[in-house]
Image: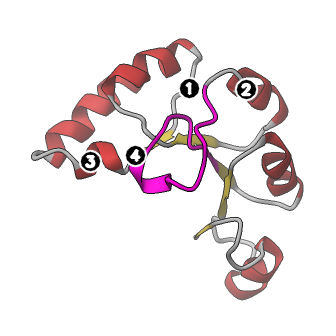
Amino acid sequence: MHLGQKDLSLKSARKILGKDKIIGISCHNTKQAKLAQRDGADYIGFGPIYKTPTKKQYKAIGIKKINLLKKTIKIPLFLIGGIDNPQLKILKALKINRIAVCSALYKTKNVSKKIKLLRSYLN
């Protein structure tokens, strides 16, 4: 299950789903990420890193905070928001190997090919 900041609380989700289910939290700043980790999230979706049409309500965070976040957060961290081929080279240099993509897949005609290409940048 994946929860947004305005969704059901992690504590409530755990009560419903149990301790063996994977629950992630969307975070838009370091404070939210630290709280999600402290509260027992299994992973964090962090972003939007770049401007994206799927998260118009949020300002792009950029990559400057990623290294600090990687030192602080010990659970899996997935970057999200405006990530496509050109940005993957930058993220790979930062040793990022987990991403979540929506618009990159939405705007392509061949989803399978696009997924293979994105994976090739991360492996």
Within the magenta stretch, is there residue 72? no
Residue at the spot 87% in from the left edge and 54% down from the top edge: 35
Neighbourhood count class around disc 1 (C-alpha, 10 Å): few under 14, some 14–19, many 20 upward:
some
Vertical placement of 24 versus 52: above or below? below
- Answer with mark 3 or mark 1, whichever residue precedes in sequence: 1
Q: In the structure shown, which secondary structural element does the residue marked by tag 2 occupy?
A: loop
Label disc, if present, on residue 105 of the rendered structure: 3
Residue matched to label 4: 101
Q: How is the image coloured?
A: secondary structure
Q: In the structure shown, which secondary structural element does the residue marked by tag 3 occupy?
A: helix
Q: Which residues are magenta?
A: 45-62
Magenta span: chief secondary structure: loop
Neighbourhood count class around disc 3 (C-alpha, 10 Å): few under 14, some 14–19, many 20 upward:
some
Quarter of the figure that contains the C terminus: top left
Q: In the structure shown, which secondary structural element does the residue marked by tag 1 occupy?
A: loop
* In contact (CB < 8 Å): disc 3 and disc 4: yes
As measured in the structure, the alpha-carbon distance from the residue carrying label 1 to the one carrying label 4 is: 14 Å
Instruction: Tell which of 60 and 105 is nearer to you.
Output: 60
Label disc, if present, on residue 65 of the rendered structure: 2
- Answer with mark 1 or mark 2, whichever residue precedes in sequence: 2
